[in-house]
Image: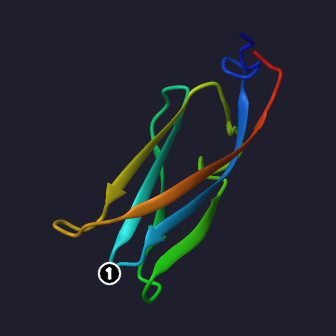
């Protein structure tokens, strides 16, 4: 059985693609941590009318140095007692051969 050649190499994190149910007054907070560093947060407004909100979060780690072996993602709701529905999230990254 062959294994992926990328599990323990550095990845270049580019963006998240978020598909969530629109909810009036709600904001989804997405936290990103590379290699056990502190979380860097991005806010995604989910108030775009009815149906679904589809958006891209570019450079989710907040600047240069988006390379890491371990990518942790945290989702937070900005409103108490407000349900958020995340339909899908895509993580766009470029694998590297660096170890």
State the image quarter where residue 66 is shown.
top right
Query: Residue 42 in the image: x percent, y percent?
Result: 50, 59
Which of the image's four quarters has the N terminus? top right
Query: Residue 93 in the image: x percent, y percent?
Result: 72, 42
| Residue farthest to the top, as pictured | 1
Query: Residue 14 in the image: x percent, y percent?
Result: 71, 49
User: Is disc 1 surrounded by few (<14), some (14 to 19) or many (20+) residues within 10 Å?
Assistant: few
State the image quarter where residue 29 is shown.
bottom left
- Answer with left or right where residue 16 lies relative to residue 85: right
Asked which colour scheme the image uses, the reply is: rainbow
- Answer with left or right where residue 1 lies relative to residue 47: right
- Answer with left or right where residue 19 lies relative to residue 59: left
Which residue shows up at 41% across the image and 78% down it? 22
Q: Is residue 94 above or below residue 36?
A: below
Given residues 38 and 82, the one toward you in this image is: 82
Which residue is the site of mark 1?
A: 25
Which residue shows up at 35% across the image and 78% down it? 23
Given residues 78 and 1, the one toward you in this image is: 1
Which residue shows up at 45% across the image and 36% down it? 38
Which of the image's four quarters has the C terminus? top right
């Amino acid at each position: 059985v062959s294994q992926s050649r990328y599990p323990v190499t550095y990845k270049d994190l580019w963006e998240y693609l978020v598909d969530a149910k629109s909810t009036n007054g709600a904001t989804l907070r997405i936290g990103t941590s590379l290699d056990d560093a502190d979380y860097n947060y991005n806010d995604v407004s989910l108030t775009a009318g009815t149906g679904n909100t589809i958006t891209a979060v570019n450079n989710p780690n907040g600047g240069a140095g988006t390379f890491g072996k371990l990518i942790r993602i945290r989702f937070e709701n900005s409103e108490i007692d407000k349900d958020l529905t995340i339909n899908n999230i895509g993580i766009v990254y470029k694998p590297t051969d660096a170890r």
